[in-house]
Protein backbone atom coordinates (compact mmCIF):
# COMPACT_ATOMS: atom_id res chain seq x y z
CA UNK A 1 0.00 0.00 0.00
CA UNK A 2 2.84 2.40 0.81
CA UNK A 3 4.24 1.90 -2.70
CA UNK A 4 0.86 2.63 -4.26
CA UNK A 5 0.48 5.81 -2.19
CA UNK A 6 3.98 7.04 -3.09
CA UNK A 7 3.46 6.32 -6.80
CA UNK A 8 0.05 7.98 -7.05
CA UNK A 9 1.34 10.97 -5.10
CA UNK A 10 4.27 11.34 -7.50
CA UNK A 11 1.88 11.12 -10.45
CA UNK A 12 -0.38 13.82 -8.98
CA UNK A 13 2.62 16.10 -8.40
CA UNK A 14 3.81 15.84 -12.01
CA UNK A 15 0.26 16.26 -13.29
CA UNK A 16 0.27 19.56 -11.39
CA UNK A 17 3.55 20.53 -13.05
CA UNK A 18 2.08 19.63 -16.44
CA UNK A 19 -0.98 21.76 -15.70
CA UNK A 20 1.20 24.77 -14.91
CA UNK A 21 3.28 24.19 -18.06
CA UNK A 22 0.21 23.91 -20.29
CA UNK A 23 -1.23 27.09 -18.81
CA UNK A 24 2.04 28.92 -19.42
CA UNK A 25 2.25 27.72 -23.04
CA UNK A 26 -1.41 28.56 -23.65
CA UNK A 27 -0.97 32.14 -22.45
CA UNK A 28 2.13 32.70 -24.60
CA UNK A 29 0.69 30.97 -27.67
CA UNK A 30 -0.87 33.13 -30.36
CA UNK A 31 -2.64 30.24 -32.11
CA UNK A 32 -6.35 29.88 -31.43
CA UNK A 33 -9.24 27.94 -32.88
CA UNK A 34 -10.56 24.35 -32.98
CA UNK A 35 -7.40 22.88 -34.52
CA UNK A 36 -5.17 24.39 -31.86
CA UNK A 37 -7.53 23.17 -29.15
CA UNK A 38 -7.57 19.65 -30.59
CA UNK A 39 -3.77 19.64 -30.77
CA UNK A 40 -3.49 20.71 -27.13
CA UNK A 41 -5.89 17.94 -26.08
CA UNK A 42 -3.74 15.35 -27.86
CA UNK A 43 -0.61 16.75 -26.24
CA UNK A 44 -2.26 16.63 -22.82
CA UNK A 45 -3.15 12.95 -23.32
CA UNK A 46 0.41 12.09 -24.34
CA UNK A 47 1.92 14.00 -21.41
CA UNK A 48 -0.50 12.34 -18.97
CA UNK A 49 0.46 8.89 -20.26
CA UNK A 50 4.17 9.72 -19.96
CA UNK A 51 3.68 10.99 -16.41
CA UNK A 52 2.00 7.74 -15.37
CA UNK A 53 4.62 5.56 -17.08
CA UNK A 54 7.74 7.47 -15.99
CA UNK A 55 6.51 7.92 -12.42
CA UNK A 56 6.03 4.18 -12.11
CA UNK A 57 9.51 3.53 -13.50
CA UNK A 58 11.16 6.08 -11.23
CA UNK A 59 9.54 4.49 -8.18
CA UNK A 60 11.02 1.02 -8.90
CA UNK A 61 13.88 1.52 -6.37
CA UNK A 62 11.24 2.49 -3.84
CA UNK A 63 9.45 -0.82 -4.43
CA UNK A 64 12.73 -2.66 -3.83
CA UNK A 65 13.69 -0.90 -0.58
CA UNK A 66 10.33 -0.84 1.22
CA UNK A 67 10.03 -4.17 2.99
CA UNK A 68 8.05 -5.51 5.92
CA UNK A 69 10.04 -7.14 8.70
CA UNK A 70 8.96 -8.99 11.81
CA UNK A 71 9.10 -6.77 14.88
CA UNK A 72 10.89 -9.48 16.83
CA UNK A 73 8.38 -9.51 19.69
CA UNK A 74 5.23 -11.62 19.80
CA UNK A 75 2.25 -10.37 21.79
CA UNK A 76 -0.61 -12.77 22.49
CA UNK A 77 0.98 -15.25 20.05
CA UNK A 78 0.71 -12.70 17.24
CA UNK A 79 3.67 -11.48 15.20
CA UNK A 80 3.76 -7.80 14.35
CA UNK A 81 5.48 -6.33 11.32
CA UNK A 82 7.00 -2.94 10.60
CA UNK A 83 8.63 -1.14 7.68
CA UNK A 84 12.29 -1.96 7.24
CA UNK A 85 14.59 0.54 8.94
CA UNK A 86 16.39 2.50 6.22
CA UNK A 87 19.24 3.49 8.60
CA UNK A 88 19.72 6.84 6.87
CA UNK A 89 22.89 8.89 7.40
CA UNK A 90 24.74 5.92 8.92
CA UNK A 91 27.46 3.57 7.74
CA UNK A 92 24.80 0.86 7.38
CA UNK A 93 22.82 2.71 4.71
CA UNK A 94 22.50 0.56 1.58
CA UNK A 95 23.43 2.15 -1.75
CA UNK A 96 20.06 1.39 -3.33
CA UNK A 97 18.29 2.87 -0.31
CA UNK A 98 20.33 6.06 -0.49
CA UNK A 99 19.77 6.34 -4.24
CA UNK A 100 16.04 5.77 -3.77
CA UNK A 101 15.64 8.42 -1.06
CA UNK A 102 17.67 11.05 -2.94
CA UNK A 103 15.86 10.31 -6.21
CA UNK A 104 12.48 10.56 -4.51
CA UNK A 105 13.39 13.86 -2.83
CA UNK A 106 14.65 15.40 -6.07
CA UNK A 107 12.27 13.97 -8.67
CA UNK A 108 9.06 13.88 -6.61
CA UNK A 109 9.57 16.99 -4.46
CA UNK A 110 12.27 19.55 -5.20
CA UNK A 111 12.49 19.52 -9.02
CA UNK A 112 8.67 19.77 -9.46
CA UNK A 113 8.64 22.68 -7.00
CA UNK A 114 11.39 24.48 -8.91
CA UNK A 115 9.60 23.95 -12.22
CA UNK A 116 6.34 25.20 -10.77
CA UNK A 117 8.16 28.27 -9.42
CA UNK A 118 9.42 29.01 -12.93
CA UNK A 119 6.00 28.60 -14.54
CA UNK A 120 4.14 30.46 -11.80
CA UNK A 121 6.65 33.32 -11.97
CA UNK A 122 6.04 33.56 -15.70
CA UNK A 123 2.30 33.53 -15.13
CA UNK A 124 2.60 36.36 -12.62
CA UNK A 125 4.66 38.33 -15.12
CA UNK A 126 2.05 37.93 -17.83
CA UNK A 127 -0.76 38.79 -15.43
CA UNK A 128 0.82 41.90 -13.93
CA UNK A 129 2.98 43.41 -16.68
CA UNK A 130 1.37 42.33 -19.93
CA UNK A 131 -2.08 42.33 -18.36
CA UNK A 132 -2.00 46.11 -18.07
CA UNK A 133 -1.55 46.62 -21.80
CA UNK A 134 -4.23 44.02 -22.52
CA UNK A 135 -6.70 45.78 -20.29
CA UNK A 136 -6.03 49.06 -22.08
CA UNK A 137 -6.70 47.40 -25.41
CA UNK A 138 -9.81 45.68 -24.12
CA UNK A 139 -11.16 48.98 -22.87
CA UNK A 140 -11.86 49.87 -26.50
CA UNK A 141 -12.69 46.32 -27.62
CA UNK A 142 -15.95 44.42 -27.57
CA UNK A 143 -17.58 43.05 -24.41
CA UNK A 144 -17.07 39.45 -25.56
CA UNK A 145 -13.29 39.88 -25.65
CA UNK A 146 -13.35 41.55 -22.24
CA UNK A 147 -15.35 38.64 -20.82
CA UNK A 148 -12.91 36.17 -22.37
CA UNK A 149 -9.96 37.95 -20.73
CA UNK A 150 -11.68 37.94 -17.32
CA UNK A 151 -12.29 34.21 -17.63
CA UNK A 152 -8.63 33.64 -18.49
CA UNK A 153 -7.46 35.76 -15.55
CA UNK A 154 -9.75 33.86 -13.15
CA UNK A 155 -8.40 30.51 -14.33
CA UNK A 156 -4.83 31.71 -13.96
CA UNK A 157 -5.47 32.99 -10.42
CA UNK A 158 -6.95 29.61 -9.53
CA UNK A 159 -3.84 27.88 -10.82
CA UNK A 160 -1.59 30.21 -8.82
CA UNK A 161 -3.46 29.44 -5.60
CA UNK A 162 -3.07 25.72 -6.25
CA UNK A 163 0.64 26.21 -6.98
CA UNK A 164 1.27 28.17 -3.77
CA UNK A 165 -0.41 25.47 -1.69
CA UNK A 166 1.62 22.88 -3.56
CA UNK A 167 4.90 24.63 -2.73
CA UNK A 168 4.01 25.00 0.94
CA UNK A 169 3.21 21.30 1.11
CA UNK A 170 5.93 19.66 -0.98
CA UNK A 171 9.08 21.80 -0.89
CA UNK A 172 9.75 21.60 2.88
CA UNK A 173 9.26 17.84 2.80
CA UNK A 174 11.78 17.44 -0.02
CA UNK A 175 14.37 19.48 1.85
CA UNK A 176 13.82 17.46 5.03
CA UNK A 177 14.24 14.20 3.12
CA UNK A 178 17.57 15.35 1.69
CA UNK A 179 18.77 16.44 5.13
CA UNK A 180 17.81 13.02 6.47
CA UNK A 181 20.31 11.40 4.09
CA UNK A 182 23.21 13.62 5.18
CA UNK A 183 22.72 14.62 8.83
CA UNK A 184 23.08 11.76 11.37
CA UNK A 185 20.02 11.37 13.59
CA UNK A 186 17.99 13.92 11.59
CA UNK A 187 15.55 11.31 10.30
CA UNK A 188 14.60 10.02 13.76
CA UNK A 189 14.77 13.31 15.66
CA UNK A 190 13.18 15.69 13.14
CA UNK A 191 11.68 14.06 10.04
CA UNK A 192 10.00 11.08 11.71
CA UNK A 193 8.18 13.17 14.40
CA UNK A 194 6.96 15.57 11.69
CA UNK A 195 5.88 12.77 9.34
CA UNK A 196 2.25 12.64 10.43
CA UNK A 197 1.93 16.42 10.24
CA UNK A 198 3.37 16.57 6.72
CA UNK A 199 1.12 13.72 5.57
CA UNK A 200 -1.90 15.51 7.03
CA UNK A 201 -1.00 18.77 5.27
CA UNK A 202 -0.56 16.88 1.98
CA UNK A 203 -3.98 15.23 2.37
CA UNK A 204 -5.63 18.57 3.15
CA UNK A 205 -3.97 20.15 0.13
CA UNK A 206 -5.13 17.35 -2.16
CA UNK A 207 -8.68 17.47 -0.80
CA UNK A 208 -9.17 21.22 -1.21
CA UNK A 209 -7.80 21.38 -4.76
CA UNK A 210 -11.07 20.10 -6.18
CA UNK A 211 -13.02 22.64 -4.10
CA UNK A 212 -10.77 25.44 -5.37
CA UNK A 213 -11.34 24.36 -8.96
CA UNK A 214 -15.09 24.41 -8.46
CA UNK A 215 -15.13 27.78 -6.65
CA UNK A 216 -12.79 29.73 -8.91
CA UNK A 217 -13.46 28.33 -12.39
CA UNK A 218 -16.86 28.45 -14.06
CA UNK A 219 -15.41 26.50 -17.00
CA UNK A 220 -14.29 23.67 -14.69
CA UNK A 221 -17.71 23.53 -13.00
CA UNK A 222 -19.54 23.41 -16.31
CA UNK A 223 -17.22 20.74 -17.71
CA UNK A 224 -17.47 18.60 -14.57
CA UNK A 225 -21.27 18.77 -14.48
CA UNK A 226 -21.43 17.93 -18.18
CA UNK A 227 -19.14 14.90 -17.78
CA UNK A 228 -20.96 13.74 -14.62
CA UNK A 229 -24.43 13.82 -16.13
CA UNK A 230 -23.22 12.33 -19.41
CA UNK A 231 -21.69 9.47 -17.44
CA UNK A 232 -24.91 8.97 -15.46
CA UNK A 233 -26.98 8.99 -18.65
CA UNK A 234 -24.66 6.40 -20.23
CA UNK A 235 -24.85 4.12 -17.19
CA UNK A 236 -28.63 4.49 -17.10
CA UNK A 237 -28.87 3.60 -20.78
CA UNK A 238 -26.69 0.50 -20.30
CA UNK A 239 -28.74 -0.55 -17.27
CA UNK A 240 -32.03 -0.16 -19.15
CA UNK A 241 -30.61 -2.10 -22.12
CA UNK A 242 -29.51 -4.99 -19.87
CA UNK A 243 -32.89 -5.02 -18.13
CA UNK A 244 -34.66 -5.10 -21.49
CA UNK A 245 -32.49 -8.01 -22.67
CA UNK A 246 -33.24 -9.98 -19.50
CA UNK A 247 -36.98 -9.45 -19.93
CA UNK A 248 -36.74 -10.54 -23.55
CA UNK A 249 -34.89 -13.72 -22.59
CA UNK A 250 -37.49 -14.50 -19.95
CA UNK A 251 -40.37 -14.00 -22.38
CA UNK A 252 -38.91 -16.18 -25.15
CA UNK A 253 -39.61 -19.61 -23.51
CA UNK A 254 -43.19 -18.53 -22.76
CA UNK A 255 -43.79 -17.55 -26.35
CA UNK A 256 -42.37 -20.87 -27.58
CA UNK A 257 -44.64 -22.86 -25.28
CA UNK A 258 -47.67 -20.90 -26.43
CA UNK A 259 -46.86 -21.61 -30.06
CA UNK A 260 -46.70 -25.30 -29.42
Image: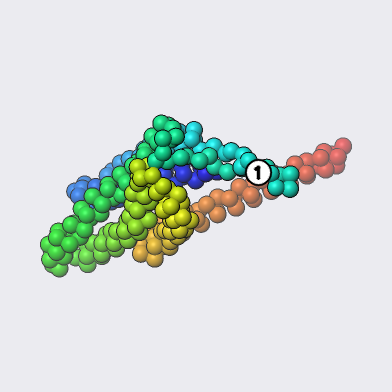
The spot of residue 158 in percent (x, y) is 32, 61
Q: Which image quadrant for residue 81? A: top right
* Residue 227 in view in this figure: yes
- Measuring from the top left, give residue 233's x and y in whole percent: 55, 54
Is residue 104 in view from this perspective? no
Q: Residue at x 64, y 47 (%)?
A: 241
In the rendering, at what x and y percent does residue 121 appear? 22, 54
Position of 231 compared to 23: left or right? right
Residue 24 in picture, x, y percent from top left: 25, 50
In the figure, is residue 232 to the left or right of 245? Answer: left
- Is residue 63 placed above or below 41 in the rendered structure? above
Label 1: which secondary element: strand
Quarter of the C terminus within the rendering: top right
> Residue 153 falls in which quadrant of the image?
bottom left
Q: Which residue is mark 1?
A: 73
| Circle 1 residues within 10 Å: few <14, some 14–19, many ≥20 | few
Front residue of 97 and 148: 97
The colour scheme of the drawn protein is rainbow
Image-based side of 121 in relation to 214, left or right: left
Amino acid sequence: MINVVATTHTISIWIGVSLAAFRFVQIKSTTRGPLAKERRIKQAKVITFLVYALSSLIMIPNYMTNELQADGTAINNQTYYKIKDLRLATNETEDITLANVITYALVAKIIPCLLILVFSGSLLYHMSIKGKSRRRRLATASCSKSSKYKKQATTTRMLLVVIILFLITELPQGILILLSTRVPGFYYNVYYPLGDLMDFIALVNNSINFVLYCIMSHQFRSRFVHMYYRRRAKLKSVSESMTSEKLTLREQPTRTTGAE
